[in-house]
Image (spheres, rainbow, N blue to C red):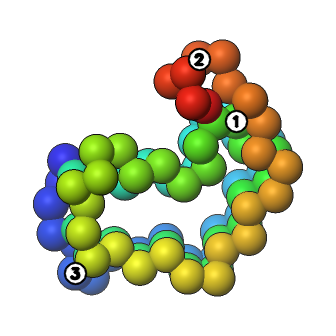
Amino acid sequence: MIGELHNSYAKGLALHKGFNRAFTLHGAHYLRLIENVAYEVKGHTVFIEDAIETNNYIYKNLIMKTMRSMSGLNTD
């Protein structure tokens, strides 16, 4: 619920064996997720929370081996 993030980004990160989502965009606008890798993360790897989030840029991310989570939503 942070709002507009014109100068914020996550770039070149590697997430391995995460116990929850890699990225959650909740009320975030203009955030950039660029060239990240998420491997063996539980639940939605990139989760757009309310579908009101706008103008976010998700580009060239590698998501592999997403695992089922029992602690999140039913869709996780």
Per the image, the residue denoted by label 2 is 71
Q: Is residue 71 above or below residue 42?
A: above
Can residue 72 be seen here? Answer: no
Residue 4 in the image: state x and y as whole percent: 16, 69
Q: In this view, does 40 lie above or below 59?
A: above
Q: Give the Cα separation between the discs numbered 3 and 2.
A: 32 Å
- Identify which amino acid the numbered label 3 is placed on: His
- Identify which amino acid the numbered label 2 is placed on: Ser
Mark 3 Cα within 10 Å, few/some/many (few <14, many 20+)?
Answer: few
**Residue sitting at 41 percent across and 79 percent down?**
57
Secondary element at image label 1 = loop
Circles 2 and 1, Cβ within 8 Å, touching? The answer is yes
Per the image, the residue denoted by label 3 is 6
In the rendered view, does 50 fall on the left or right side of 40? left
Nearer to the camera, 28 or 18: 28
Residue 49 in the image: state x and y as whole percent: 35, 44
**Residue sitting at 81 percent across and 58 percent down?**
64
Quadrant of the image occupied by residue 63: bottom right
**Residue sitting at 66 percent across and 74 percent down?**
61
**Disc on res. 42:** 1
